[in-house]
């Protein structure tokens, strides 16, 4: 495998392989010196055209813990401001001699385009509404650490702004291919217009799904990706769909609460819920490093030299 553009690049077997590799890298991240020489001599560049805290730090930490050299490109302070095109920018970065490019962009399909232009491995770190494969992998990894290898029959409810969520798209693919049963929950205006072929059920009433949910996966309202008013107000949304302590109490006692971050406390999730012992939000972040180490190792660790 050369690139990771979406979950379909992996399939169920590939996902399993990433998760197993991530187990051993999680062990590495817990050592006193959390570093292995696996990618010594390789260069990993992160190229973020959209805001990010955890994804960018996580990829950079992962690359460093594998002993790769890292470079960071931030759109805000680059020659993009001087009018340079994406193609020219990417070719310039490639000319430094790089092995992998981790790309985030607000338009769907950009990582795929770049993969057609240069020789380096491309990792999609989130493209528009399309996909965010490493997020889905770290979510599956986090679930597996709690529930073991067997996802069959696990009931996952993804709640919120599904329409604009690349996290939801990648998670639907990953979790359903592992055997989980996914329900999408949210107002009709925040559902994708065409759900045909998606392996999901839809419910517009969060209170109906709570008692039978094993994993409540909460999403942020992605207002920066919305161009129209899709619900009356954030307060109204919070009342209808926000995960409050009352709603938390209606979940089975051993259910888990997940969120990809960043959270908007008081809107889609209450502060007390985010900090509840059943919430694994910080574990998701910690696991992200091990999972991204596994992905970078899979793409670059074959021992071959850089493509000419
Ligand atoms: C998500 C993203 O950017 O797609 N965040 C993340 O990577 N952890 C979700 C979001 O922005 O709400």
Image (spheres, rainbow, N blue to C red):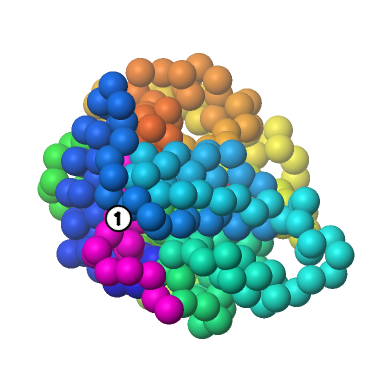
Q: Is residue 178 visible?
A: no
- When asked about the image quadrant of residue 225, the answer is bottom right
Residue 55 place in picture, x, y as percent: 51, 45
| Residue drawn at (75%, 45%) of the image | 232
**Taking 218 as reference, is 107 above or below it?**
below
| Residue drawn at (72%, 51%) of the image | 224
Q: What's drawn in magenta, residue-wise?
A: 290-308
Count up the numbered dots: 1
In the figure, is residue 188 to the left or right of 293? right
**Taking 124 as reference, is 263 above or below it?**
above
Q: Secondary structure at mark 1?
A: helix
Label 1 packing within 10 angstroms: few (<14), some (14-19), many (20+): many
Q: Nearer the viewer, residue 102 or 193?
A: 102
Q: Nearer the viewer, residue 278 or 232?
A: 278
Q: Which part of the image, by quadrant, shows the N terminus? A: bottom left
**Taking 211 as reference, is 140 above or below it?**
below
Residue 204 place in picture, x, y as percent: 50, 50
Q: Is residue 294 magenta?
A: yes
Q: Is residue 98 visible?
A: yes
Q: Is residue 237 magenta?
A: no
| Residue drawn at (61%, 27%) of the image | 265
- When asked about the image quadrant of residue 66, the answer is top left
Residue 187 place in picture, x, y as percent: 58, 51
Residue 46 place in picture, x, y as percent: 55, 54
Q: Nearer the viewer, residue 303 or 253?
A: 303
- The residue pinned by badge 1 equals 297
Q: Which residue is the extreme one toward the bottom? A: 116
Q: Within 8 Å of ligand 1, the CB of disc 1? A: no
| Residue drawn at (75%, 74%) of the image | 85
Q: Which part of the image, by quadrant, shows the C terminus? A: bottom left
């Amino acid at each position: 495998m050369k690139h990771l553009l979406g979950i379909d690049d992996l399939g169920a077997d590939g996902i399993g392989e990433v998760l197993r590799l991530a187990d051993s890298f999680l062990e590495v991240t817990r050592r006193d010196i959390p570093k292995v020489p696996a990618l010594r001599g390789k260069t990993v560049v992160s190229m973020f055209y959209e805001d990010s805290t955890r994804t960018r730090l996580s990829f950079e930490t992962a690359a460093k813990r594998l002993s790769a050299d890292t470079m960071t490109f931030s759109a805000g302070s680059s020659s993009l401001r001087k009018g340079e095109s994406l193609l020219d920018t990417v070719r310039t970065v490639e000319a430094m001699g790089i092995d992998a490019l981790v790309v985030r962009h607000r338009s769907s399909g950009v990582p795929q385009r770049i993969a057609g232009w240069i020789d380096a491995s491309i990792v999609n770190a989130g493209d528009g509404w399309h996909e965010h494969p490493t997020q889905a992998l770290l979510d599956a990894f986090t679930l597996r650490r709690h529930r073991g290898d067997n996802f069959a029959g696990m009931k996952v409810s993804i709640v919120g702004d599904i329409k604009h969520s690349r996290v939801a798209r990648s998670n639907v693919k990953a979790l359903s291919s592992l055997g989980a049963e996914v329900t999408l929950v949210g107002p009709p205006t925040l559902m994708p217009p065409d759900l045909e072929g998606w392996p999901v059920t839809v419910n517009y009433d969060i209170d109906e799904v709570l008692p039978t949910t094993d994993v409540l996966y909460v999403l942020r309202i992605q207002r920066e990706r919305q161009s129209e008013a899709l619900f009356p107000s954030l307060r109204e949304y919070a009342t209808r769909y926000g995960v409050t302590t009352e709603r938390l109490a209606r979940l089975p006692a051993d259910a888990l609460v997940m969120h990809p971050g960043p959270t908007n406390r008081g809107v889609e999730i209450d502060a007390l819920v985010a900090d509840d012992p059943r919430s694994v939000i910080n574990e998701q972040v910690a696991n992200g490093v091990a999972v991204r180490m596994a992905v970078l190792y899979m793409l670059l660790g074959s021992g071959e030299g850089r493509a000419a």
